[in-house]
Amino acid sequence: MINQIELMEVVEKYRDNGIVVPTMTGSRGWDKVSSNKNRDIPLGGAMGKASSFALGVALAQPDKRVIIFDGDGSLLMNLGTLVTIAEKAPKNLYHFVLENGVYAVTGGQPIPGNNRISFAGMAKEAGYANAFEFDDLEDFASRAAEVMGAEGPVFICVKTTPEIQNEPMGLRAPSGVKPTKAAIQDLKKDLGV
Amino acid sequence: MTQQALLSPEAVIQEFKNNGITHIVYLPDSETNWMYQLMEAEPDMDLIPVTREGESIAVAAGVIAGGKKPVVLIQNTGLFESGDSIRGIAIDCALPIVMLIGYRGWTRHGATPDSAARFTEPILRAWGITYYLVEHDGDADRISLAFQEAERTNMPVVVLVGDEYHGFNR
């Protein structure tokens, strides 16, 4: 199992000032690590659609690296995205899935198929150019150059430790993560588009 | 029985060109099926096929965030499926996404038995989304109005394709 912050610290080294689209618990983690928040789009609305959004960005900005931090429960809500992404095959897209096995923000209920399905296997069979799976940080760190240098679309499933939120919604502290609307405006300004 | 086409795909594609469309995000439907060949032949428009309509809104949002100009082409049944994407992305993020919606079941002649048609306009009104009806080539400039409205308001706008006999058939 890998701590998501430690994973993201490694990925950040290979960001190349690219555009990063995190979602759900990944948004809170990436917010602590990011070196350029003007190029981060934490996608809060429409659970499951972060990878679809990132595909649109990757196709509009083919010369920029685009990195997704998806959730396993989120991906299950939009599995067709694997086929859609593979069909367009953007070479600049890196699709991480933080597989913690649970719906962390709703109290940690297990996702359907936990420990029985292979997300990397599904991505590979859908047609991603490359697919990897990691459950050890040192293993990932030692191969990060290979992973982030591979031709996209690249799928990277990472077994992560769940960070379960179980407080009632009204009692949770604000995440501090930038709202998606403002993030899109900041990105466009930063890109000059 | 042979019937004359009312809304030609050429007229729609020309509207896309007039408005600088760079990406067409779509899922084929029976009202817009004949668009495909013409869209595929357009070198300046990237076709992005999706597996379910809710994806289309998020993909289009990403295209906008990346500085390009998309249009979404789906059926009204897919509009219903896209509800949370329209709410959580297009509306909440104030994005000028224009959606051409095949108006399945729509008719000017008597009652429609198709619930897809009956629910379409009430749902658009409930979501506060402006919409324009396009039935034939003479209406095609409403597509430009939709793009202008979307840009002016920073909101999604719908064009309902109500060619009740042919869709985009020739």
Image: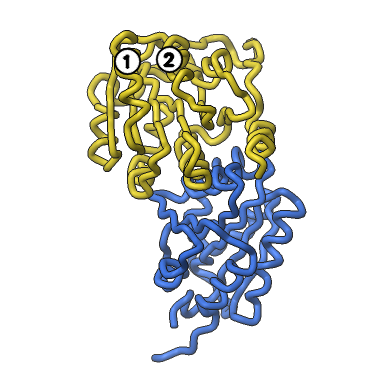
Tag 2 residue: A10
Closer to us: A128 or B9 = A128
**Residue A3 percent coordinates (x, y):** 41, 9
Q: Colour of chain B?
A: blue
Q: How many marks?
A: 2
Closer to us: B130 or B77 = B130
**A114 on left or right of A85:** left
Q: Residue at x 48, y 41 (%)?
A: A63
- Kind of residue at badge 2: Val
Check the picture and name the quadrant holding the N terminus of chain B: bottom left
Q: Quadrant of residue A44?
A: top right
Tag 1 residue: A140
Whether B34 is drawn above or below B25: the answer is below
Is residue B92 shown to the viewer in this render?
A: no
In primary-sequence order, the first of circles 2 and 1 is 2
Q: Residue at x 63, y 69 (%)?
A: B18
